[in-house]
Amino acid sequence: MSETTQILPFQIDISQPALDDLIDRLARTRLPAEIPGVGWSRGVPADYLRELADYWRDEFDWRAQEARLNAFPQYITEIDGQKLHFLHVRSPEPDALPLLLVHGWPGSIAEFTELIGPLTDPVRHGGDAADAFHVIVPSIPGFGFSGPATDPGWSSRRIAAAFAELMNRLDYDSYGAQGGDIGAGICRELGLIDAEHVVALHVNGGLSYPQLTDEEVSRLSDAERARIDRMNEFMQEASGYLAIQSTRPQTLAYALTDSPIGQLAWIVDKYNDFTNLDKLPHDAVGRDVLLTQVSIYWFTGTAGSSAAAYYEDAHSGAGWGLPEPSTVPTAVAQFTIQDVAIRDYDERANNIVAWTEYDRGGHFAAMEAPDLLLADIRDCYRTRRQPAVGSATAQSSRPGRREHDG
């Protein structure tokens, strides 16, 4: 079947049998034995996971979260042979700048819900009309309602190309992009392949894990050395998921797709490592927000195809920290010690125009510190709302433009 450029309305509608099956599976959970007193040192503690699973089964209201997400206009299209789901929320301000928000792993469209209102309608939220954005939030191919992936090869570069085509179909000639985690890497790729239309990039967490010599480390500030220490600690103690997802995502998928407690534990373990180290995962982002994320992975069966994003980059050469230089103006926001990029290192291949460090939040800034992230995004784009270079001729040079009712 040939690909269509048609854009169709979409609503999330998880069937009642699927909800009943989740509850039944959670009720029949079999937890492993655990050595007493080891805490989080070997992974998620059984008592913590049992309490969270019980809440998921007995108190969590998926229908309420589904309705919350469905309050935003959503669409489906097909790009490069893959279904692509996205939110598209237009601003009431006529001069709003289109802004692509790109989630990471283990993330979804749900992590941006607190930002969409203030970004699209700043006046209603106590801000300035000049800071308005049209917001587009895609589910990464292979993730959530865009998944599972239907063919291999969905590297960061290919994902970025799909997003560039999405913005083309939406008739946006100039736009910005924001992302964290693997979303930051996808945004960087977008700046490389669609630079004439991308006015600026904003990322939280940085663009690469620095590979520094001992001499380079000795020249860092105390704060930067603390970030390097945190990165080394993370790679030694908590990077097992990187090795598995970069090499055997399909083997992992069997366990996570068949067992909700397995899917919950896999994601909660990373939230514990990525969020503010002074808080438990459910305190850092909110219990219902955390379980909404896990539920999306569970209901869409995308544990394997989302994990495979790491495999594709590891086997294609695409991803963070590519030596190919990026000229697109890029602003970086770092939230506590959980973000480990070093400015001097990122500046070697990127046009860094702003670098801000915050003492609150964590790796999932859109959920942990949405107010700080919102302000930083606004600061990034205040002086970059003019049309992107080359966009005056984009109407004729970018084929396939179509209108839709979003």
Image: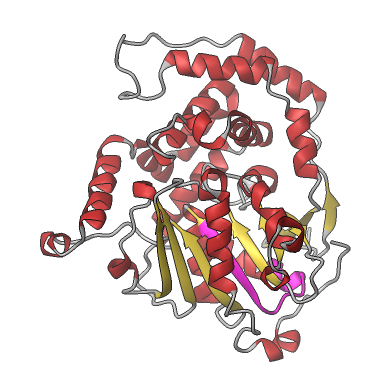
Residue with the most extreme right position: 405
Could you say where residue 349 lies in the image, as x and y percent from the top left? 35, 74
Could you say where residue 189 lies in the image, as x and y percent from the top left? 50, 68
Could you say where residue 81 lies in the image, as x and y percent from the top left? 69, 58
Q: Tell me, yes or no, whether the highlighted magenta stretch contains residue 297.
A: no
Query: To which quarter of the image does residue 304 belong?
Result: top right
Q: Which residue occupies 45% across, 80% down? A: 327
Q: Quadrant of the C terminus?
A: bottom right
Q: Is residue 235 visible?
A: yes
Q: Is residue 135 above or below residue 150?
A: below
Q: Is residue 254 visible?
A: no
Q: With 207 as the anchor, is 121 left or right in this view?
A: right
Query: To which quarter of the image does residue 21 belong?
Result: top right
Q: Which span of residues is magenta-colored? A: 166-179
179 or 19, which is in the foreground?
Answer: 179
Query: To which quarter of the image does residue 161 belong?
Result: bottom right
Could you say where residue 121 lies in the image, as x and y percent from the top left? 75, 61
